[in-house]
Image: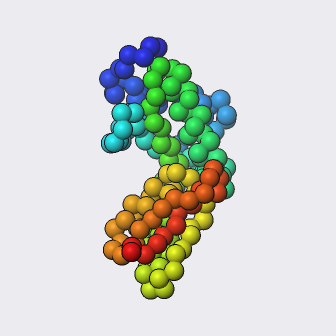
Amino acid sequence: MTDKKIDNKKRNKIILKMVVELFEDINREIDDVFVEDVESEGETDQVLIGMTVADPSTLIGYRGKSLASVQQILSLKVKNKLGYWVRVLLDVNEYRKEQEKRLSEISKSAAMRVKETGENASLSPMSSYERRICHTVIGEVEGVKTESEGEGESRHVVIKIVA
């Protein structure tokens, strides 16, 4: 295809077909799958691919690392097929929803601890997606702020008292 964008409905059908083909190629059976548009703040289109599989653990991997890799592969395949970038978010067996809930709880707890003690708190190293969730959740807590520190795999969120 070319750099000319196609309508979202047609694009999503193409992406859905690509997902099914990829999972057939790696001998993974999909119980259910959908592709839907996601609101995005940037210029890049964004889609959510939600799927249900029998054994999600190998697809998700340790702390979602395998899921992130498959998501990256899909993004590149979509770019090659369509000729333009579409940000792909892959969610297997609602892992992202559970991850968001877990990160929200950790973030709120750490923010409250910072408010009580006045001491900064560093969260574990995370992906940019995970850090964004933490920044958003902690941004709703009065009296604290967040910053990302570190480089590459060591990048993490630090929670501080607002001066």
Could you say which quadrant of the image residue 145 lies in? bottom left
Q: Position of residue 74 (x, y in %)?
A: 55, 33
Direction from residue 26 to residue 38 in the image, left or right = left
* In the image, farthest residue toward the top: 2
- Whether residue 57 is visible here, answered yes or no, is no
Q: Position of residue 135 (x, y in %)?
A: 43, 61
Q: Quadrant of the C terminus?
A: bottom left
Toward the viewer: 92 or 119? Answer: 119
Q: Is residue 54 above or below residue 34?
A: below
- Whether residue 14 is visible here, answered yes or no, is yes
Q: Is residue 110 above or below residue 28?
A: below
Toward the viewer: 109 or 121? Answer: 121
Toward the viewer: 4 or 157? Answer: 157
Direction from residue 154 to residue 36 in the image, left or right = left
Q: Position of residue 103 (x, y in %)?
A: 49, 65
Direction from residue 136 to residue 148 in the image, left or right = right
* In the image, farthest residue toward the bottom: 116
Q: Is residue 1 above or below residue 77?
A: above
The residue at the point 36 percent across, 33 percent down is 43
* In the image, farthest residue toward the front: 163
The residue at the point 50 percent across, 51 percent down is 129
Q: Position of residue 37 (x, y in %)?
A: 35, 38
The residue at the point 54 percent across, 74 percent down is 121
